[in-house]
Image (cartoon, rainbow, N blue to C red):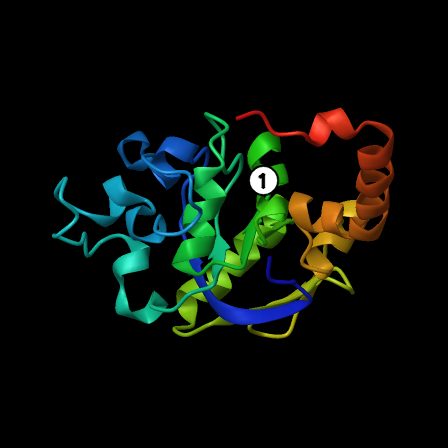
Amino acid sequence: MKPFTTHEGLAVPIDRPNIDTDQIIPKQFLRKIERSGFGIHLFHDWRYLDDAGTAPNPEFSLNQQRYQGASVLLTRDNFGCGSSREHAPWALEDFGFRAIIAPSYADIFYNNCFKNGILPVVLKTEEVEELFQSIGKTPGARIKIDLDKQNVISPEGKVYSFEVDSFRKYCLFNGLDDIGLTLQHADKIGLFEEKNRKEEPWLYTSKK
């Protein structure tokens, strides 16, 4: 997993509350367990005017030229609600998003973001509104996020502070998902397996 230390990127607004995971990645695209390849289907029902995904909706922000290459998503309350599919952060990450800024998130989605290299920033409703106004009036507006200092810097240079759990911060800062955390103890795991193989060799005997 790619570490998150600081990130500065073009911000794109999706001005809707209660965006659920079925809108983030519709159920018909949940056909594989690999993490890659979901970005093309992100927000499919809003991005496209047809089921095949060949007619982009020009009214949707992700399709507008001014937001091409965006890596920071700005949105409203209760983002990621609905079913607990991990494909939702997979799709966001595969599309290129490194951070999301919203007043609140669904709990399971929020946790899944950290495990997939995305920083979900929680700011006050009025602070999010200020960022919406800033992005709306300034084409190419970029937002900087510093995980170590736990702050967001607006296009005008205004600083907003956010809270984050210390363990989640450690994992994201060091690029550690659940597998990475386990592999930190690879030496101890190896020693246990070696000892256990000697004490209980029958567990390691393959049957033909």
Relative to residue 32, is residue 105 drawn left or right? right
**Residue 127, percent from left and from top:** 62, 53
SS class, disc 1 = helix
Residue at 52% over, 26% down: 208
How many numbered discs sit on the rendered protein?
A: 1
- Give residue 201's quadrant in the image: top right
157 up-or-down from 128: above or below = below
Q: Indicate whether 75 appears above or below 12.
A: above
Query: In the visual, does 95 lie left or right of 158?
Result: left
Q: Quadrant of residue 64?
A: bottom left
Q: Give residue 202's position: percent from left, percent from top.
A: 74, 25
The residue closer to the viewer here, 154 or 32, is: 32
- Looking at the rendered structure, the kind of residue marked 1 is Asn
Residue annotated with mark 1? 112
Residue drawn at point x = 87 percent, y = 38 percent = 195
Residue 74 visible in the current orientation? yes
In the rendered image, which quarter contains the N terminus? Answer: bottom right
Q: Say whether residue 86 is left or right of residue 5.
A: left
Tell me residue 123's x, y (percent): 65, 49
